Image (spheres, rainbow, N blue to C red):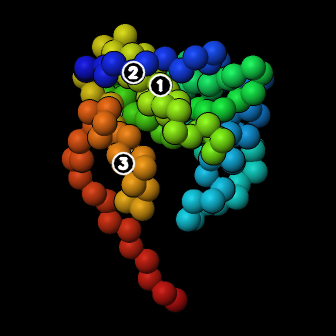
Amino acid sequence: LVVPEVRPVPSVSYLTWDAESVHAFFAVYEAAFRERPGFPGWSQETWGRWVSDDPLFRPDLSFLAVVQGQAVGFVTNGEDEVAPERDGYLIQVGVHPQWRGQRLGAALVARSLQAWQQEAKEAVLLHVNINNPESIRLYRQLGFVVVGRRGKFSRHL
């Protein structure tokens, strides 16, 4: 697993996921994603369970970026469900809209890749919506490659 060189964002500190930080993770999640198509509008409790109830979730490798006491970005991580012994999985990456364009997303992903490298993982996977070109561009810049696309099916009743 090769970790790309990413300049650290000045004055950012990082916390990991725990009972005290989940509210701040959620606040950034909500700010980062509320304008995205399909945003579910979940409560903190529902979103927190969606992330943390997965037995492969890694709270110790999920990071909240904080600047001067304000939560500005986050990444949640888990082990990949297909090959958990071999691969890590980026569950979700979000940056507060006021902090976009400052390489914070890149710093969060690089921090995750470093953590997965220390866990001796061979690869890290993620999913990104096709209608999110900014994120796709970021992941490509960080060395991720497309390995497949998922179909989404619906049936009108």
Q: Which residue is mark 3?
A: 136
- In the image, residue 78 sits, relative to residue 48, either above or below, namely above
Q: Which residue is mark 2?
A: 6
Q: CA distance from mark 1 to mark 2?
A: 6 Å
Residue type at the position of mark 1: Ala
| Residue in the picture at 62% in, 26% down | 64
| Residue in the picture at 61% in, 33% down | 73
- Front position among marks 3 and 2: 2
Q: Earlier in the sequence, mark 3 or mark 2?
A: 2
Residue sticking out furthest to the top: 118
Q: Could you say which disc has been placed on residue 107 in the image?
A: 1
- In the image, residue 46 sits, relative to residue 37, either above or below, namely above
Q: Earlier in the sequence, mark 1 or mark 2?
A: 2
Left or right relative to 134: residue 63: right
Binning the other alpha carbons within 10 Å of mark 3 as few (below 14), some (14 to 19) or many (20 upward) gives: some
SS assignment at label 1: helix
SS assignment at label 2: loop
Question: Given contact means CB atoms under 8 Å apart, are the residues at marks 3 and 1 in contact?
Answer: no
